[in-house]
Amino acid sequence: MDIEQVKSTESIVSMKRLFQLFFKPKHFFSDFKNLNRESTYIFTYIAAMYVFMDRMDSQLIKTQTVTGGNLESYHWFINTWIKYWGFSAIASIFVAFFIWFVYGWWYEMRLKWSGVENQPSLLVRQVNAMQLCIAAIPVLIITIVQTFLYENYEAAFLAPEVYSGLIVLFFLVYSCWVSYVAVKTVFNANKFALFWFLILPLTVYVGVIAAFITLVV
């Protein structure tokens, strides 16, 4: 993870820049190269927390479907918030490296297929981390709120409310649009970016959601 020379002292970590990321992504990414981006590693870790939590939720759903709702095999992880947050925080350190190198590599490959050549790998991985946070930050906020509302993560997971799920779904879809805006703005990707960064991810998400509905119904 070589850190390139940064010309600006203004960091991407500010309420102003986070507001732009979520609500004015084109503005955010038009300034991206000129900002101090060293804190991108923090956002990579946030994305890792989201990815790990999402994978664990997938395992819980599969287990719940197979056992008819019995999650006893995961009680060591979900029966207290301390265990849930503690294990997630530690595991996400390793997931962060996977996101940085593997997710970053896949992002770079799609850029090449979209006509983008000779871009610093560091910059590519930084853009990837930021667009992932569109879905990651809302999930973390929701989980923090649930920490105060429910006795443990198992209770939160089994709660019969749908609003949090709809919010997560919205930002997951929106992250695809932000990713597309990012590669067009930062890298001036060609028309094939529409497929690689918007159509393909949305198609995958629709397929996953359809499979999930089939599984639980």
Image (cartoon, grey):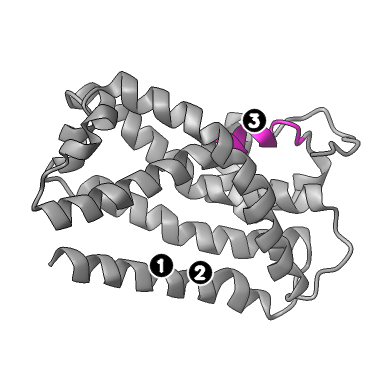
Q: Please name which of the two marks, 3 or 1, marks the residue nearer to the observer.
A: 1
Mark before the other along the chain sequence, 3 or 2: 3
Element type at marker 2?
helix
Callout 3 environment at 10 Å: few (<14), some (14 to 19), or many (20+)?
Answer: some
Element type at marker 1?
helix
Spatial CA span between label 3 and label 2: 27 Å
Q: Check disc 3 and give the amino acid type.
A: Val
Along the horizontal axis of the image, is 73 left or right of 94? left
**Which label number is shown at residue 13?**
3
Callout 1 environment at 10 Å: few (<14), some (14 to 19), or many (20+)?
Answer: some
10 over 185 or under it: above or below:
above
Q: Which residue is mark 2?
A: 201
Q: Which residue is mark 1?
A: 205
Element type at marker 3?
loop
Q: Is 139 a magenta residue?
A: no
Circles 3 and 1: CB atoms closer than 8 Å: no
Which residue is rendered at x = 59% and y = 51% of the image?
131
Instruction: Give the camera-side residue of 132 and 104.
Output: 104
Q: Which residues are magenta?
A: 37-45
**Which label number is shown at residue 180?**
none
Spatial CA span between label 3 and label 1: 29 Å
Circles 1 and 2: CB atoms closer than 8 Å: yes
Task: From the top left corner, tell me how far across and down residue 18 is, in percent.
Answer: 58, 38
Q: Pick the quarter of the image with the C terminus.
A: bottom left
